[in-house]
Image: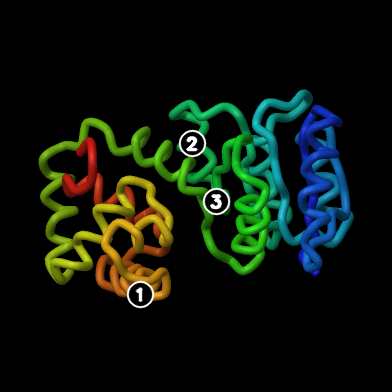
Amino acid sequence: MIRVLVADDEPLIRAGIRQILASADDIEVVGEAGDGREAVDLACSRAVDVALLDIRMPVQDGLDALAELRRVAPGVRALVLTTFGERDNVLRALADGGAGFLLKDTAPGELIRAVRAAAAGHAFLSPGATRHVVDTLATGVEPARRSAARRRLAELSAREAEVLALLGEGLSNAEVGRRIHVSEATVKTYVSRILAKCRCDNRVQAALLARDAGLGAGS
């Protein structure tokens, strides 16, 4: 079982998240917190695999709680779940080791997938959040940074570069498959090759690399 801690200062939001996660037979909510301080205390006193942290909470906000969890409970994977997507919040969540940044309009199935991915040690951003992060962080790319990004793409085939460009637009594997008329399994193979060749740990880093290199819509 994946043991989850839910931290949000709104009881109704916590209840909704608990109900969504309860529909998955491999996930158990083992604790709820109304502020970041309580979340850290619970994570230290209970066996927790994944913490879902709202950003705007009293006493201690979710970003401060995330940073503290990395120090006192490094085995807990933290997902930031919020309606607030300002640049500084995104930067802090990723820089402090967050396992994902999800917006509160994320579909229930995406939330479950995010928890499973985080528990498995992977970074996860839903397609909508990926688009937001990429658009936020990949603006105003300096020429040197763009040149460095393009050098990292030198080993990609034309098809792999096409798939990377679509990742840069925040498309899911299924959406990429429909766009280029291949199966989702084939897209997964392309993504694995892209990550290896570009030395990226996850698809979010690949999406940012695509934007840095000038690939994808709006670059």
**Residue 90: mark in rendering:** 2
**Residue type at mark 1?**
Thr
Callout 3: SS: loop
Foreground residue among 120 and 45: 120
Seen at 54% across and 51% down, the residue is 97
Callout 1: SS: helix
Foreground residue among 28 and 76: 28
Give the quarter of the figure containing the C terminus: top left
Q: Earlier in the sequence, mark 3 or mark 1?
A: 3
Give the quarter of the figure containing the N terminus: bottom right
Q: Position of residue 170 (x, y in %)?
A: 38, 47
Q: Position of residue 147 (x, y in %)?
A: 11, 50
Quadrant in the rendering for residue 53: top right
Circle 1 sits on which residue?
Answer: 186
Point out the frontmost of discs 2 and 1. 1
Seen at 57% across and 49% down, the residue is 98
- Density class for disc 3 (Cα within 10 Å; few <14, some 14-19, many ≥20) is some
Seen at 65% across and 53% down, the residue is 109
Circle 3 sits on which residue?
Answer: 97
